[in-house]
Image (cartoon, rainbow, N blue to C red):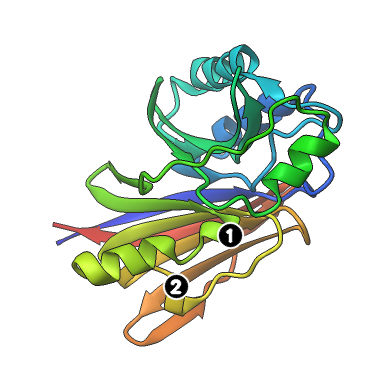
Amino acid sequence: MIEEKIKAGIWVEYTNDGVKQDGLVDDLTYFIKEYELDVFLGPEWLFMPKDSLYTEQGKKKLVDELISKTKNTKALILPGSILWEDDNFFYNSIPVIHQGKMIGEYFKRIDGGTEEAAKERHSKRKRYAGKKDYGLYNWSGYDMGVEICADHGILYTYLGYESKPFLDLYFVAACGIAVYDSASPLKNKGYCLFADGKLPKAEAYQKQDKEFNKIDHKKTSANLVMYELVMKKT
């Protein structure tokens, strides 16, 4: 068994009414590099402009910029969700980025306020499109899962029925919910990282036997709260 310490950073920002986008990618990139983060998580709707949605092309440009500016870092990056639209639908998704690649993209399944946010930003699309894929990925030998806000618990139900909760890392990007041990699909000693854009706040938990223990942050700087995760793998 190998013990590994992981530096995780969670971005704290109020996102419920949209966020000024100018310079946002540069700010995230700065902190990821400055603190040599292994993991970065942002809240739901961090990439939701105050008066518009990202177009499909604009969303691709945004993801490409995130990839380009972080490709020489070691960080696993879940930068927060993006509100965007194509010719048919609007979406709420979070890219999963590592070393110059998007290794996955999780689409919020339950509307959970997305339609209202799109209408407030004058979207001409009439329908929200979630996807039925589960946000399950592998990173650096760890099993990890991703959910957005109202989806919290779907992954646990799926894993609970199909096998059993086995995740080392569980990420929740939210805007207005709380996380619960009964809905977090973690194996023993696994970690949950939670970013909420409504209060706003950052939280981290570790499952220890039957307990779901909140862990203390190691450091804060501007919008960033940092934690040290002690991981074990074979």
Looking at the image, can residue 17 be seen? yes
Which amino acid is tagged 2?
Answer: Ala
- Residue 52 lies left or right of residue 92; in this view the side is right
The quadrant of the image that shows the N terminus is bottom left
Instruction: Determine the residue positioned at 64% across, 28% down.
Output: 84
The quadrant of the image that shows the C terminus is bottom left
Task: Say which of 112 and 25 sits in front.
Answer: 112
- Residue 65 lies left or right of residue 137; in this view the side is right
Residue 170 place in picture, x, y as percent: 42, 58
Nearer the observer: mark 1 or 2; the answer is 1
Is 157 situated above or below 148?
A: below
Residue 175 place in picture, x, y as percent: 69, 55
Task: Say which of 18 and 125 sits in front.
Answer: 125
- Picture disc at residue 85: none
Which amino acid is tagged 1?
Answer: Ala
The residue wearing badge 1 is 150
The residue wearing badge 2 is 183
Hey, which residue is sitting farthest bottom in the picture? 210
Kind of element beneath mark 1: helix
Is 49 situated above or below 45?
A: above
Looking at the image, can residue 165 be seen? no
